[in-house]
Amino acid sequence: MSNKRVLSGMQPSGKLHLGNWLGALKNWVKLQHEYESFFFIADWHALSTNYEDTSRIRENVFEMAVDWVAAGLDPEKSVIFLQSGVLEHAELHVLLSMMTPVSWLERNPTYKDQQQQITGRDLATYGFLGYPVLQAADILIYRANCIPVGIDQLPHLELTREICRRFNTFYGDVFPEPQPLLAETAKVPGLDGRKMSKSYGNTINLSDTPEEIRQKVMTMVTDPQRIKRTDVGNPEVCGVYSFHKIFSSKDEQAEVAEGCRTAGIGCIDCKKRLLANLMAELTPIQEKRNELVAAPDKIRAILDDGAGRARKAAQETMQAVRESMKLYV
Ligand code: TRP
Ligand code: SF4
């Protein structure tokens, strides 16, 4: 067990799909055995782009917490909490905002990108510009060392590091500089071959019923050149085979690939084999999930307990921050 601290967060987007699970969560589940770990649901960050209609946020937080625990985040091992449950994040955010140059925020690539991509919402807001300052507060308040994130988050993490150095230069070494932890994660394509994404409607969700998953797998796009059962196929251009590479044993992958290339196996059989392997991994998660959905008090208790433990760590840091800044203590 390393004495370093790991921290990461996710915006509550609702039910998680296989891409979220394999791309992030599965790695967190592993990390919790190696580091002191903090994982939180970034509900304030969700408001930066969804401030008008907040009608689903509570439900989304609940669904996300259920998925996390069902997938193996263990509240005994990790501190699992909701950002808005630890008010100290807001205090540190306000202090960091005083010393963060606006130019740093304006040149953040995701700021301009998202403003262009997300249409129909006014994102010329103070909170949206300050998104990375809040993220810096989330990280620094736990004096976290390692931040498991995807490459899309690297600019935000670099800003956190710059803010960290600026603070330490002005007031003394309070915060360690956090490092990104880029994991090698499996990339699952969506059902249509594009990236798996909620906005494309091409996902398999952890919460889908076995019947829904069966239907999704059986209608997946295959090698478009393989039309008849007697046509030979190319597994390397087939989405089903990409899934085999993640969920099937090496032997079975080889068998399926050979069968595809020689028309020895049909696509329906190929999909059935994938489905069996996929369900073998998902069934335990789904069973846990069903238990948790039926016990919402349990989820609430996990988040409350997590917030209590997170708050204790955050308050310790804030005491050091106030002292170093010569504020009222
Ligand atoms: N911005 C992150 C995302 O969209 C979520 C996030 C908020 C986060 N605060 C964080 C991630 C702190 C890591 C650390 O995915
Ligand atoms: Fe894809 Fe399998 Fe059909 Fe080959 S046999 S095209 S790998 S579904």
Image (tube, rainbow, N blue to C red):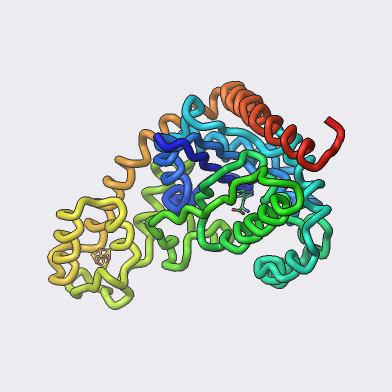
Q: On the rendered structure, is 161 left or right of 223?
A: right
Percent from the top left, x then y, of residue 211? 40, 44
* Nearer to me, 49 or 75: 75
Residue 11 versus residue 102 in the image, above or below: above
The quarter holding residue 306 reads top right
Residue at 37% across / 49% down in the picture? 214
Quadrant position of the C terminus in the picture: top right
Residue at 71% across / 72% down in the picture? 116
Q: On the rendered structure, is 152 left or right of 49?
A: left
Percent from the top left, x then y, of residue 203? 48, 55
Residue 183 versus residue 62 in the image, above or below: below
Residue at 33% across / 41% down in the picture? 281
Quadrant position of the N terminus in the picture: top left
Any part of residue 10 in sight: yes
Q: On the rendered structure, is 257 left or right of 166?
A: left
Percent from the top left, x then y, of residue 282? 37, 41
Q: On the rendered structure, is 185 left or right of 172?
A: left
Please, which residue is most extreme toward the right here? 328
The quarter holding residue 298 reads top right
Q: How many marks?
A: 0
Any part of residue 71 in sight: no
* Nearer to me, 160 or 254: 160
Residue at 78% across / 36% down in the picture? 323
Residue 313 versus residue 282 in the image, above or below: above
> Where is ligand 2, by quadrant?
bottom left
* Nearer to me, 277 or 161: 161
Percent from the top left, x then y, of residue 244? 28, 57
Residue 53 versus residue 256 in the image, above or below: above
